[in-house]
Image (tube, rainbow, N blue to C red):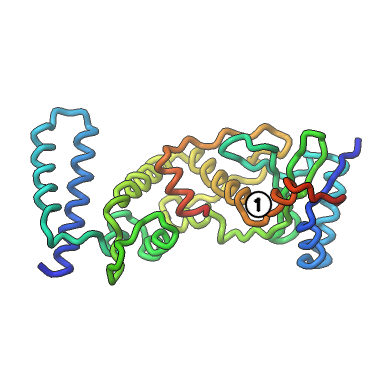
Amino acid sequence: MAFTVRRVPEVRRTVESDLTKRERRAYDVAVEALRGEGCRAGGKRLAAADSGDYPMCQRSLYGAWRLVTVYLRDRSILIVAVTQHTKAETPSAKLVRSFPGLAVTGRRRSDQPACCEDPEAPPTLTQDLEEILFGAFVL
Amino acid sequence: VGKRESQQVAYAVVELQDARDELAASGQDVGEALRRIEDAVERLDGLTSVAPGLSVAETARYLGVSEPTVREWLKRGVLGAVPGAKPVLVERDGLRRVHRAVEELRERGQDADWLHALLDYLDDIAVRRSPAVQQGLAEMAAGHLEPA
């Protein structure tokens, strides 16, 4: 069964103006995969503090480009963003830089929750630690 | 008292307050020791010569992070700067809270599973909160959708 895949106008603008031909091809392949396979082609499930309004997933395209999708109740799929992921600027990289004793990298992709799986519970954090981590590394 | 000495006293006050909190949390019968520490803190804190904050270098030493990290955290509002102080002083209020959180992070970060989950979680939240995703969600809420 084919899935309906839509996008917001900003995604079109990004695809048309910012992606190279090769990156654009990767985008087209991802859209086709989403049409055919649904969430199985969505990449990894993004964790959230709460379950959020919709499941949200992120799939790698080409190089640093990532495609972010949400899964609506009518079973359609919406591409909400095509955005670049700069590894050095991720919160985890910044945290590890600030605390060399915690020198680990994120989990391997194969260990991360697949898009179709239920989200994992976020790690337990005290309120102080959560506020400070978010303040220092996320926003 | 010179500026340097007054900052040293401020540092000592912060460390005494930490020691007091640790003793209080130990559950042991340390009432007398606590009272003496509190008296000392009060006397020191009452001195007009005590600096209202710690220098960036002292804050870095206290938290066990680098000076650029302290400056970054000041910029992001995780640490507060004493208004008008030049060079910059880090406000003592809030600094101990950050210290406790940092200690908690170091302690719990020894658990590799917890740390991996934390790193993934922070990255995921950053994606969710990124301007690109927020704009996409706003366009979705406004019903601006088109075929992919």
Measured as percent of width and height from the top left, residue B87 is found at 28, 71
Residue B31: x %, y % from top left:
12, 32
User: Which picture quadrant has residue A122?
Assistant: top right
User: Residue drawn at (39%, 61%), measured in percent from left and top?
Assistant: B74
Which residue in the protein does label 1 denote?
B134
Q: Residue at x 42, y 39 (%)?
A: A127
| Position of A4 relative to B14 (above/below) | above
* Location of residue A128 (image quadrant): top left
Q: Amino acid at mark 1?
A: Gln
**Could you say whether the residue bearing mark 1 is in a helix, strand or loop?**
helix
Does residue A84 appear to the left or right of B63 in the view shown? right
Outermost right residue: A1
Image spot of residue A24 (x, y percent): 82, 61
Report the front residue among A17 and B23.
A17
Instruction: Say which quadrant the N terminus of chain A sits in.
Output: top right
Answer with left or right where residue A136 lies relative to residue A6: left
Residue at mark 1: chain: B
